[in-house]
Amino acid sequence: MKKLEQIYEGKAKKVFSTDDPRLLIVEYKDDATAFNGLKKGTISGKGAINNQMSNRMMQLLEEQGIPTHFVEELSERETVVKRVSIVPLEVIIRNISAGSFAKRYGVEEGIVFDEPTIEFSYKNDELGDPLINDRHAIAMKLATREEIDRITELAFEVNSFMRGFFSGIGVDLVDFKLEFGRLPDGSIILADEVSPDTCRFWDSVTHEKLDKDRFRRDLGGVEDAYREIMRRVSGKAGNR
Ligand code: UDP
């Protein structure tokens, strides 16, 4: 499988077409941004870690019956994925208060919820990815009722599996963002990435942050945190 032409460059990834119109190649970069692009930097080795961690997670999720865009890891930083039309919603699941939830509602970080929450943001950089509810998303024709119900079901299944998986490697899964896409037959699959860029991981014992918050909040040890979470994931998930 070869890259044909670059069709998109985002903050953390480049996307290329291939000779198969159903497939794309994603290349992960070391570039990092936060606060809607206001903060920019590089996290050395991040591209390779996010590529490999996301691929391991998608393979495990497939084994749980969750359809994903993962096809084949090509190299450290490159993966073949199914071409989808992205549903322009960021789907955020939370198990523990942190980040914008804590800020929005004026609560401390670290409150363990009785039930996980779900929220949607409208993927639109110019507007700063505003929060949106299901009925607004349908009104905006971003997705149908059936698609939103399926996305909600899949997102909670992803959470149940990942929470247990990470708990087994001494990590609390605080919250994470998912994106979903439509295949040509209209079915919904998990797309984008599952990585320390898109999840909050706290060590279960020390509560040390093992994710992009180290970059967002200038906590130092960013590269080490990415390496540590990858080390634990590979130890448990193995090389598939
Ligand atoms: N998140 C993400 N991309 C975004 C916004 C959030 O991957 O554009 C992830 C983030 O890493 C965290 C979760 O979604 O794991 C919840 O983020 P939150 O809404 O608290 O926003 P933040 O505090 O990161 O701005």
Image (tube, rainbow, N blue to C red):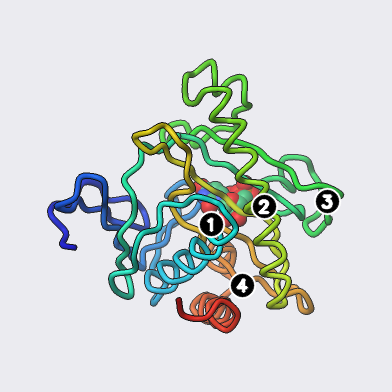
Q: What is the number of the mark on residue 113?
A: 3
Establish whether ligand 1 lies closer than 8 Å to the Cβ of label 2.
yes
Q: Label 4 amino acid?
A: Leu
Label 4 to label 1, Cα distance in Å?
Answer: 12 Å
Label 2 to label 4, Cα distance in Å?
Answer: 14 Å
Q: Nearer the viewer, mark 2 or mark 3?
A: 3
**N-terminal-most mark, 1 or 3:** 3
Outermost residue, top side? 139
Q: What is the number of the mark on residue 99?
A: 2
**N-terminal-most mark, 2 or 3:** 2
Kindly identify the residue that appears in the image at 16 percent across and 59 percent down.
3
Kindly identify the residue that appears in the image at 44 percent across and 73 percent down.
49
Q: Position of residue 131 (x, y in %)?
A: 60, 32
Q: Label 2 amino acid?
A: Gly
Crowd class of label 2 (few under 14; some 14 to 19; many from 20; radius 10 Å)? some
Crowd class of label 3 (few under 14; some 14 to 19; many from 20; radius 10 Å)? few
Kindly identify the residue that appears in the image at 72 percent across and 40 percent down.
104
